[in-house]
Image (cartoon, rainbow, N blue to C red):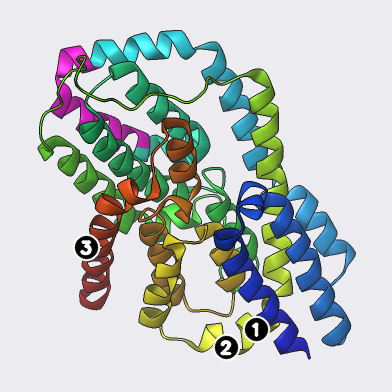
Amino acid sequence: MLESGLILIILLVLSLPIAVTLIEENLEVFLFIMGVCAVSTAHFFGGGGFWTGHLIKEALSEPLMITAAVFVMGFIIYILKKPITRFIVKIEHKLGSKYFAAFLIVTLGLLSSVLTAIMSAIILVEAVSALKLSKKYELKLVILGCFSIGLGAALTPIGEPLSTIAISKLKGEPFLADFFFLLKNIGVYVFPGIFLLGVLGYVIEPAVKESASVKTLSEKESETIKDIFVYSGKVYIFIVALVLLGEGFRPIVDKYIVRLPGGWLYWINSLSAVMDNATLAAAEISPYMTLLQIKYLLMGLLVAGGMLIPGNIPNIICAGRLKIKSKEWAKLGLPLGGAMMLAYFIVFLLH
């Protein structure tokens, strides 16, 4: 009963956000409900010990750091929006489109672990909206930028929910994960990926300035103070849900997932293309894994997360604000992500 109940919840978590638009639009609440169900199932059918004061305290406290970072950075960017836009246009004019594309992709990737993935994505949207380049070029710039942000934001626990939940689950024995744990262990893979994406940003065909006959991506809506409170609250609920899901799925993870070789975990996590990678991280990561398994798992999630719009938070933000369709994203995201997955897998095999 325990395993069948948890497997059913896992299937619901994986399938319903893709199949039901209402759930996709209210993902945080849905995952919170599923997290409560998962912990309750494990508690009542697994002999107790899951609903504890420690779990409740952890679920309520774990999101505080990233939520505060999102909130503060949101206000800073809101206040400085016009100067940031002017600075972006000035830099693009000075560097030229090709050098600017590389600069933007690499800079956002490197800073996203401090700015947070959400704020970096918003800056990317502002940059694209300010430049008014051809839609075809802008689309490639956005996708490359989101891949870069998705990689870089994972290096600290304030960067994105995936890294927050990873540190939360590994902070005890044997890893004793601290603030710089992910930077020390996957930075060697992440940094070359970010710079490679910057190179790709440089070599894509030069942009064509907007004219009456040239379509361009444009921002769907402007940021408001209310939006800052709303998405900060959503981030908080999202991470609470991930903590609960991670604890609820622990019996399945400890029995099955930790036994899988790293290579299997890596390719299984190509599911991250259609499912938010932080949710998969909550379901899979365990302190009983080896460090190599964790590296395989995380890099699979991070790379595949850029392939399609639902894969991570930057994709969702940029696609929503710039009205990018799923098919448009997939035309570049899938082949690029597939090539990166293969390249990283070869690196792991040779390492």
What secondary structure do most residues of the magenta stretch adopt? helix
Establish if 183 lies above or below 37: above
Spatial CA distance of label 1 from label 2 is 6 Å
Q: Are marks 1 and 2 in contact (CB under 8 Å)?
A: yes
Density class for disc 3 (Cα within 10 Å; few <14, some 14-19, many ≥20) is few
Residue at left offset 19%, top offset 38%: 201
Left or right of 347 on screen, residue 62 = right
Residue at left offset 24%, top offset 30%: 103
Q: Magenta residues, as a range?
A: 92-108
Spatial CA distance of label 3 from label 1 is 31 Å
User: Mark 2 is on which residue type?
Assistant: Tyr
Q: In which quarter of the image is the N terminus?
A: bottom right
User: Mark 3 is on which residue type?
Assistant: Ala
Q: Mark 3 points at which residue?
A: 339
User: Mark 1 is on which residue type?
Assistant: Ile
Instruction: Please state which of residues 227 and 19 is positioned toward the viewer in this rendering.
Output: 19
Q: Is residue 103 magenta?
A: yes
Which is nearer the N-term, disc 2 or disc 3?
2
Q: Name the residue under label 2.
A: 256
Residue at left offset 28%, top offset 65%: 341
x, y percentage for residue 149? 39, 42
x, y percentage for residue 197? 23, 45
Q: Mark 1 points at which residue?
A: 252
Q: Does the magenta stretch include residue 52?
A: no
